[in-house]
Amino acid sequence: MDAFFFPSSSGARLFGVWRGVSGARRTWIFCPPFAEEEKSARRVFTEIAQRFSARGENSLIFSYRGTGDSEGDFADFGLADWRADILSAIAEAQNRAGATEIALLGLRLGASLAVGARDGAARLVLLEPILSGRSFLSQQNARKKLRAQLSGDQNLPAHDLDGWQLGEKLRDELETLDLRGFGAVSRFAGTSHVLQIGPKSEVAPPLAAFGEAIGAHTHSVVMPAFWNLLDYQKPTPLLEKLEELDD
Amino acid sequence: MTETAGKTRETALVWANSRGENLVGVWHAPPENGPLRGAILSLHGWSGFRTGPHQMLTRAAREFAPEGFATLRFDFAGRGDSDGDADFATLATMRDDALGALEVAREKLARPELPIYVLGLCSGCEIAVALVGDERARGQIAGALLWSAPVFAALPSGEREAKKRGENLRKYAAKLLQISTYRKLLRGQIDTQSVSKAMKGKSGAAFKNLESDAAGQLPVGFRAASMQGWQRFAGPVLQIYGGADPITEEAQGWYRQNSGASFASRLSSAVVAGANHSFYGLSWEREVFAISRDWLRKNHP
């Protein structure tokens, strides 16, 4: 395992953790979710990366500019910057791994970003992609309101999403992010899987339609939405599903 | 260890803990042309990782660096990017990881005469108490910054659980009745598990705090030994709580009663008005940083 900083397109450094395996056939780049969801998902990413290492595959877990340990202020960046960060992470992984198949695994907003940064990847695994940026913002606001109501604390200003400053650039890009409907996304030439994670075993129609549009296999994984949990839970159903998808 | 030096002087680190597991951390060095006053060992909460909720621990390290304080942030084994099994982590394994990290911080600081402070957030404060309570570390730690410190190694006793459950139910039931987004909660769009756990009186590490010597639980005698050591600590302590955090009153009282005779004279205490447990708001976060900066300046003018 190696932890390091590597350059983004703007020169600001991105933090990454590399798990390299000698003779690896495939290299995974993990695309993390938005802000606070990254905190809850980080350990799950690590456990997936450890599984991939055990089966002889490299992985790079990184943080976007303005998040995690990476440089920059969150408020200064938006979706286009973070798509560029995925490309920087791919380049870094290729430098480290040499010629292996590149695969992207994204969660929530990270999955949506991976769709826009998939050139050069042979495989996509998209966990609960955000299909509508506007709905996503509404959910974040609802979560903020609920937290305030439950704990009796004050209502925070609109630009303050639970301690994350929502910049204009990100807000505007989220308002226009829409992966639903005809022509919103093109088919992916490689192998792709879309996973719904939650209490239901039937894949929701919008997610199924999205999967069809990009030519992905869609699956459901019945387990809690781990990116929303305060306490860690073993992601066993997800790990088992990812093993099934290996070919 | 691996290192990438850069203009902000933040360095990625990997080192092995006493059990041979690789831990991942980041060292923040103050600007090259600025003062160097000491270092801070940053300890994250039970279920988080080194960046903290809303990146608070990363931002704190960046706030303290221009003040002349380096910071080491790292993931405990079984957390974040570090190796180790999440199920086997306890306050004792985390204390051991913190002991090793203290050595790393001392080595990176490379100035033995300079002080090292320990900073805990939420359950990270319990690790700070256990670390300071350990005689191997006590003499090396100049002071403790405790942000939202819960009762140390609280037991899931029937009485305690019932009390907590009763308090939480009263608070939440009243508020849930007024909530316009209640349907969203039921649809699973909100973190229902944490609310449910709070209602049941079971939260975080409580069930890991039984002393049994079994893997995943505390060694027998850990709680008493840590508290005795904590009571012998003579350094200054800063405690900051959120005014809307349900733990504040009980935890403050508990520390007053269980921290030794000199605690009151060494304690600086602040409550951030309206803030919740993890200071989930930009203005609350800024206030916590400002109070902590002032306290560090007061101790090291």
Image: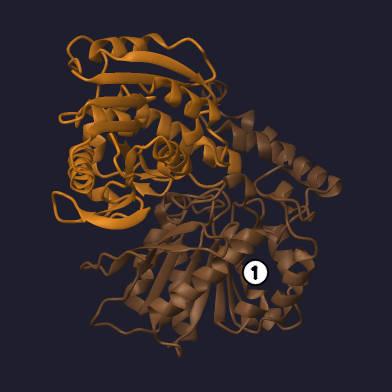
- Residue B28 visible here: yes
Q: Is residue B100 left or right of residue B32?
A: right
At horizontal 83% and vertical 48% (from top left) the residue drawn is: B157
The shade of chain A is orange
Query: Looking at the image, is B72 positioned above or below residue B49?
Result: below
Report the residue that reaches farthest toward the bottom: B113
Query: Looking at the image, is A221 positioned above or below residue B271?
Result: above
Q: Nearer the viewer, residue A155 or B98?
A: B98
Residue designated by label 1: B129
Q: Quadrant of the N terminus of chain B?
A: bottom left
Q: Quadrant of the C terminus of chain B?
A: bottom left
The kind of residue on which mark 1 rests is Val
Q: Is residue B52 left or right of residue A217?
A: right
Q: Is residue A125 left or right of residue B292?
A: left
At horizontal 23% and vertical 33% (from top left) the residue drawn is: A102
Subunit under mark 1: B
Mark 1, other Cα within 10 Å: few <14 / some 14–19 / many ≥20? many
Query: Looking at the image, is A68 positioned above or below residue A217?
Result: below
Chain letter for the brown part: B
**Residue B73 location, x and y as percent?**
44, 63
Q: Is residue A186 left or right of residue A242?
A: left
- Residue B180 visible here: no
**Residue B19 location, x and y as percent?**
57, 60
Q: Residue B38 falls in which quadrant of the image?
A: bottom left
**Residue B155 location, x and y as percent?**
78, 53
